[in-house]
Amino acid sequence: MLGGIVLQPIANRSPLPRQHNAAQAHLFGKPLLPMRTTTLFVLCLPFAASAQTALPYTTGFDNAAQQQGWQQFRTGHLSNYSWGISANAAASAPNKLWHDYPVGGNATDTVRDWYVSPLLDLSGGAVLTCKANIYAIMGSSMPSDACGIYLLTGNANPDLATATPLQDLLPLITTGSTYTTTTAVNIPPTSGTAHIAFYYQATQNWLTPGIDDVSVQPVNVGVAEHGALANMSISMSPREGLVTIALNDARYNGAMLTLQLWDARGAQVLQQAFRDRAELTLPGTAGHYICTLCDGAGNVVARAPVQRIQ
């Protein structure tokens, strides 16, 4: 125990998320550098429970309540500088999440630090935004640099989780102190253990990202639910965006309903009449959508996620 912060040793493991192998290791299309085997430590802010946190979830890392449940995992070189909470030049006072650069680092020592959120309920999908100041003293990144947002599923520990990149933050590099509100990230419906994580990788560059005002919002379908949802079956051709929808519930046999399609930001992109069965083509933009069937009063009687991948 150090100053109320728990340091927990972890057995030696591969430094890469488990879906990667040595030949395929990458982050946002950039290679992850090889590293020597080392003992890993998790820097944990103490928290009382591991229950899923319902959405909406917001944090500015401003106090103990907003920092609760966040954990740091260090899977690379153990520099003296890591993720932490800073009161210097936050986007919204008093605090921000910040990573100092590896002062005096060697080209062979790659820092790989993850800052992982509490367990979140992402079963219905979500939209993530934050404010970021990705400062680099020379205004550019080095080949060994990486900074981004990940979805971790299966475990909070990146070495044990399936890690999916959500957004690369390096394009936001600046030499100033201005924060940029990130483009909204669509998180697909994710059941079970799910976390978001901020990832930092560097060797020698003066790269100091600041993160503030993190917001994870549920996908808003804009209508109320009515009783138990009906049994709706979906068949999809995600590449072409073709979807066939059938409602298998005696309560609504022959009933005239309204089919609505919503994107991950909660905007309605399609509406049409529906009776028992329908075929539709998703919009040309790849992404995750929510399909709802509503009765005459606007109540949702069935709902399911659908996807287009091209």
Image (cartoon, helix red, strand yellow):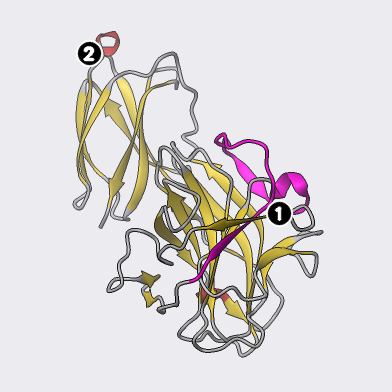
Describe residue 258's horizontal placement relative to residue 123 as left or right.
left
Describe residue 104's horizontal placement relative to residue 275 as left or right.
right
- Residue 49: percent from the left, percent from the top? 63, 35
Describe residue 87's horizontal placement relative to residue 99 as left or right.
right
- Residue 55: percent from the left, percent from the top? 57, 38
Q: Please tell me whether mark 1 sits on a helix, a strand or a loop.
A: loop
Classify 10 Å Cα crowding around label 1: few (below 14), some (14-19), many (20 and above).
Answer: many
Q: Earlier in the sequence, mark 2 or mark 1?
A: 1
Residue 254 is tagged as 2
Q: 113 or 245: which is nearer to us?
A: 113
Rounded to the nearest angstrom, the CA distance separating label 2 from label 1 is 50 Å
* Magenta span main SS: loop
Looking at the image, is 213 positioned above or below residue 106? above
From which residue to which does the magenta span run? 38-67
Q: Are marks 2 and 1 in contact (CB under 8 Å)?
A: no
- Residue 298: percent from the left, percent from the top? 44, 22
Looking at the image, is 92 positioned above or below residue 229? below
Of the 4 image quadrants, the one containing the N terminus is bottom right
**Amino acid type of the residue tagged 1 in the rendering:** Gly
Q: Determine if the magenta segment contains residue 51.
A: yes
Q: Which residue is mark 1?
A: 60
| Residue at 54 percent of width and 83 percent of height | 203
Of the 4 image quadrants, the one containing the C terminus is bottom left
Q: Determine if the magenta segment contains residue 212.
A: no
- Residue 200: percent from the left, percent from the top? 55, 70
